[in-house]
Amino acid sequence: MDATEDLVATSLSRHAADAPTDDRLLSDLHHRLRRRRTGRTIGAAVLACAAVATAITAAHSLTADLRTDPQVARPGAPDLGWRWESFKTVEVQVPSSWTQYISGPAPCTFLANPAVPTIGRLNGWLSKNWYTCSDAVLPLDRRQPYLWFDDVQAPGTKQYDGGWTEETRLVAGTKISVLTQDDALRRRILASARPITGTDYYGCTPQEPAPNTGIAPTDGVTSADICEYWKGSLVAGSTLPKAPAVTLARGLGTTPLSPPTSAPGCQDPSPRDYRITLHTPGKSWPVRISYTTCDVDHRPPGIDLIQTGVHRQIDPADIFDPVKPITTLPR
């Protein structure tokens, strides 16, 4: 066990009051490690602080429909210097400078990543039995502000050393935890939280809509909204500006479809569906892409454009991956 794994193991061994206990944690973790060593699951998320290229294969299906209503101004624009983040049933504004995304528990996942303000999501494909974080807060020299969705903290307010406070609220059935050293900033973030009624700022519904059929445009695209779903539940929403949206649209409109071919014995706990809405001056075109790491032959068109920013969250499983380099922890 190297220094990083030792630090993570020590963190996991100290159980905070709000973290759920489960005697399956160790066995599930070893099962995950064995599965990764066999190579049956193809691909993994890449650590934001390590320039590691990962070969990912994917299965895909594309469907689209044409909506003839004119594109209207988007309601609920965020304040200047802020942007919307969505998860499951809620959306909340965060400072635009917060650009690190983590899929896992707070705060242990910081151990393998840069110390910068972060948006975290405890996603359903990462079992709490595997990745429960037993530290309530990181040491002061590694502590950074964050917004975390659906973490293990119970609703309420906790005071930590150094003037840090974490406040957790339940909004539309989804927990939102905000840790800051700035009380005004924490209150500002939490005050913006609102249930997703209908669609969020990016046009995403809390539950994935049924796919439709049609043809996607290859020209005239001005932007694209991306809604990511796991088992029908909203993971995140975002917008692509014109240049990457045009590239994505051309790929979606020109790439022939092929049936998926799954690797024998592959188990992918995180198959994703992306609903891409391509905008032209007068129309909006929804296109659906299905993605899994178990297809050994194909990649969805434009998947590299789609899986950026909020849709490329750091997976805490990488710090246990025996075949990848582990970034040295900050001292």
Image (spheres, helix red, strand yellow):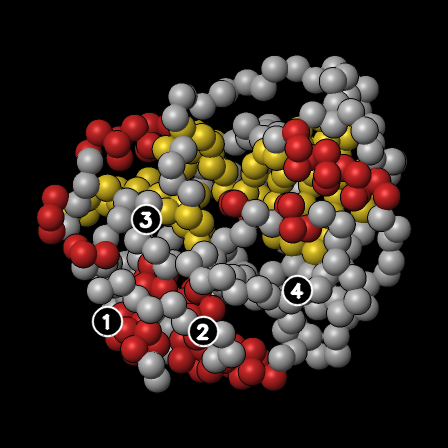
Amino acid under disc 1:
Arg
Q: Which residue is mark 3?
A: 116
Q: Return the disc, 3 or 4, that comes first in the chain's sequence.
A: 4
Amino acid under disc 4:
Ile
Amino acid under disc 2:
Pro
CA neighbours of label 1 inside 10 A, class few (<14), some (14 to 19), many (20+):
few
Q: Which mark is residue 14?
A: 1
Q: Which residue is mark 4?
A: 56
Q: Are marks 3 and 1 in contact (CB under 8 Å)?
A: no
Give the mark toward the camera: 4 or 1: 4
Q: Is residue 331 above or below residue 321?
A: above
Task: State the residue at coordinates (38%, 68%).
Answer: 327
From this viewpoint, is residue 56 visible? yes
Q: Return the disc, 1 or 2, that comes first in the chain's sequence.
A: 1
From this viewpoint, is residue 122 visible? no
Q: Position of residue 185 (x, y in %)?
A: 26, 32
Give the mark toward the camera: 3 or 2: 2
Q: Return the disc, 3 or 2, that comes first in the chain's sequence.
A: 3
Task: State the residue at coordinates (35%, 43%).
Answer: 147
The picture quadrant where one finds residue 108 is bottom left
Give the mark toward the camera: 2 or 4: 2
Task: State the residue at coordinates (71%, 47%).
Answer: 302
Q: Secondary structure at mark 4?
A: loop
Q: Which residue is mark 2?
A: 325
Residue situated in front as seen by the camera: 208 or 217 = 217
Q: Position of residue 2 (x, y in %)?
A: 33, 81
